[in-house]
Image: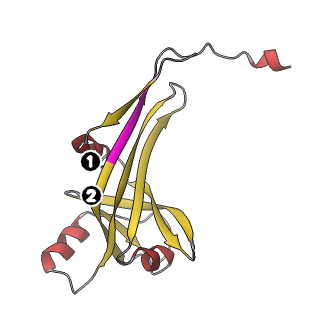
Amino acid sequence: MSDATMESIPTDECYRLLATHEIGRIGVNAEHYPLILPVNYGIDGTTLVIRTHPGTILRAAQHANVTFQVDEIDRASRSGWSVLVRGQAEEVGPEHRAEIVARTEATGVRPWAPGEHGHWVRLIVHDISGRRIVPGRLPPPVDPRAYL
């Protein structure tokens, strides 16, 4: 039996944790179903920036409410954290002020996936929350021979 605890993560620490990673998952509604996809991202203050191709994410996220999640899990210690963002997505283009375009591009988000990824999406945060699992006493290791 474990005496692990679940803690809420304060807002400022949520942003700090987001800044330690570059891969997250965006949740959008596409073709009548929720769709969750991995994306590269960067942070501009309290705004998340995603670079994408002209496909599903760009179409589904255009001025839509979306979710975004990043987490880190340590299976050995049964600990970890998760940050969940809810907000509105918008494509950044020439109609935006030059400073927004410059700041967006300055995040340096570089896609891992091959192909053209010249579109920028900013996620304007409406709500951010986080949880952390802090391990207690870990259960004793299981001897795999016990199942033979």
Do tag 2 and tag 1 residues touch (Cβ < 8 Å)?
Answer: yes
Q: Residue at x 24, y 69 (%)?
A: 104
Secondary structure under tag 2 reads strand
Residue 135 falls left or right of residue 105: right
Query: Which amino acid lies under the numbered mark 1 shown in the image of this protein?
Result: Tyr
| Magenta stretch in the rendered image | 129-135
Mark 1, residues whose alpha carbon is within 10 Å: few (<14), some, or many (≥20)?
many
Residue at the spot of label 2 = 43
Query: Does the magenta stretch mainly form a helix, a strand or a loop?
Result: strand
Please tell me which residue lies in front, 147 or 65: 65
Residue 126 x, y percent position in the rendering: 28, 60
The furthest residue to the right: 148
Q: Residue at x 29, y 44 (%)?
A: 14
Residue 139 x, y percent position in the rendering: 59, 15
Q: Residue at x 25, y 63 (%)?
A: 107
For residue 18, above or below residue 139 = below
Residue at the spot of label 1 = 15
Secondary structure under tag 1 reads helix
Q: Quadrant of residue 121?
A: bottom left
Mark 2 vs mark 1, foreground winner is 1
Residue 103 in magenta?
no
Residue 45 x, y percent position in the rendering: 19, 57
User: Along the polypeptide, which appears first: circle 2 or circle 1?
Assistant: 1
* Coloration mode: secondary structure
